[in-house]
Amino acid sequence: MTTNVRGLVDGIASEPESITADWLTAVLRGDGAIRRASVASFEVQKIGQGRGLIGRVLRILLHYDVEERRAPPTLIVKLSPADPELRDRVFELYEREIRFYTRLAPKVELRTPHLYHGSSDARTADAVLVLEDLSDFRRGEHVSGCSLERARLVVSHLARLHARWSRPQWRRKLSWLPDFSEDLEPEADAAFLQKVHALCAARWGEKFPPRALELAARFAGSASRLRAMLATSPRTLVHGDLRLDNIFFGPTRNPTRPALIDWQLARRAPGVMDVAYFVALNLDTTTRRRVELDLLKAYHSALTKDARGYGFERCLRDFRIAIVFMFFRLMTAAALLDFAGKRAQACLDSWIRRGAVMMDDHDVGAFLERRAE
């Protein structure tokens, strides 16, 4: 069955070579971005290399036969992976992202790119998204880390996002998203985590501190219990992959709400999981140690401004649990994704270094031994 969200386009551009001027014209006309103009020619740039991406991402530079005010000069096209096995495995993530952009993005306070077209085919596991190119924004740079000013901006907007979507009337709109606590059955959860640990240790063992690998091995047997500890924490819409590569910022002279891309891992979960992921991986250790508690307090204050029953101590406990899940998410990426190239290696090194130190700072080893509270 083919899901064709911007329904005037027949067929899916499953390969870069499948993209044609006629197809791009149909996409943009189906969205209403152009009326008279047609795409006369275009150029393709591969982007995203060295960023640990699952699929293929292209920037399309467009040339039209006539000028039209709303015609975009560039587009971003996301295609499912070339590898058939990986394409089957991640197909649901592409469908999830298409549904996010059509169902939720117009209601999300954070800036998100406009979806011109999204379609998927469950028979072939092919998917394509045609998105706005956020050319007026600047992507965060992960290796150098996030400034304190930008960190405060991101956390304040996360609090607004999470507060709104934790309210019952909004949370009901998230019922189609997977819930964090229901990802896997306990036995499958443990088996998957053990497999990831073994793959990661075999592939990148020399990069991980022995203490971090030891904690990760213990986590594989504790994950279900830790999920259960989060079961009664407030659910909201979380992004799920808040590394700086997925965060865009407006001009420095006029900072605005940040823009978030790549919503494939969106789900229902405690919002503090986004905060832990962002703080752990994007701030250098010295800055993170100095400001993380203040950032978390500011987040909690904004989150609970109009709601009670979620005290700061509970929020801090959830934050510490989220640190462990954050590190295993990192290990999953290291085990399964392509990190070829100098920049990719630099990103992976910084993730491991920052994440491992943060686990030690929060003594998650002792935390893993505790019974559910």
Image: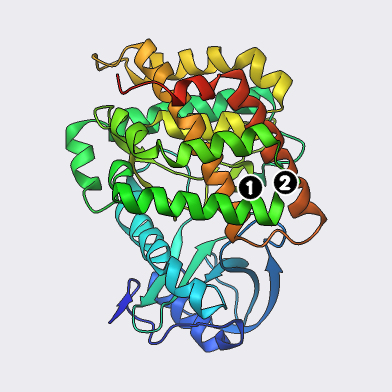
Residue for point 40% across, 24% down:
318
Q: Is residue 351 above or below residue 85?
A: above
Q: Position of residue 270 (x, y in %)?
A: 35, 32
Residue for point 76% across, 46% down:
206
Q: Which residue is mark 1?
A: 245
Q: Position of residue 30 (x, y in %)?
A: 38, 76
Q: Position of residue 123 (x, y in %)?
A: 34, 84
Give the residue type at disc 1: Asp
Q: Is residue 340 above or below residue 351?
A: below
The disc, 1 or 2, on the residue closer to the chain's N-terminal end is 1
Q: Which residue is mark 2?
A: 347
Circles 1, 2 touching at the beta carbon (< 8 Å): yes
In the image shown, does 248 or 267 lie closer to the viewer? Answer: 267
Left/right of residue 129 with respect to residue 204 in the rendered view = left
State the SS at label 1. Answer: helix
Residue 160 placement: quadrant: top left
State the SS at label 2. Answer: helix
Q: Position of residue 315 (x, y in %)?
A: 38, 18
Mark 1 to mark 2 CA distance (whole Å): 10 Å
Q: Which of the colour schemes (rainbow, by chain, secondary structure, one colour) is used?
A: rainbow
Residue for point 65% across, 23% down:
149
Give the residue type at disc 2: Cys
| Quarter occupied by the C terminus | top left
Left/right of residue 92 with respect to residue 360 in the rendered view = left
Residue 281 placement: quadrant: top right
Mark 2: few/some/many CA within 10 Å (<14, 14-19, 20+): many
In the image shown, does 363 or 163 lie closer to the viewer? Answer: 363
Label drawn at residue 137: none
Instruction: Name the mark nearer the viewer: 1 or 2.
Output: 2
Q: Is residue 32 visible?
A: no
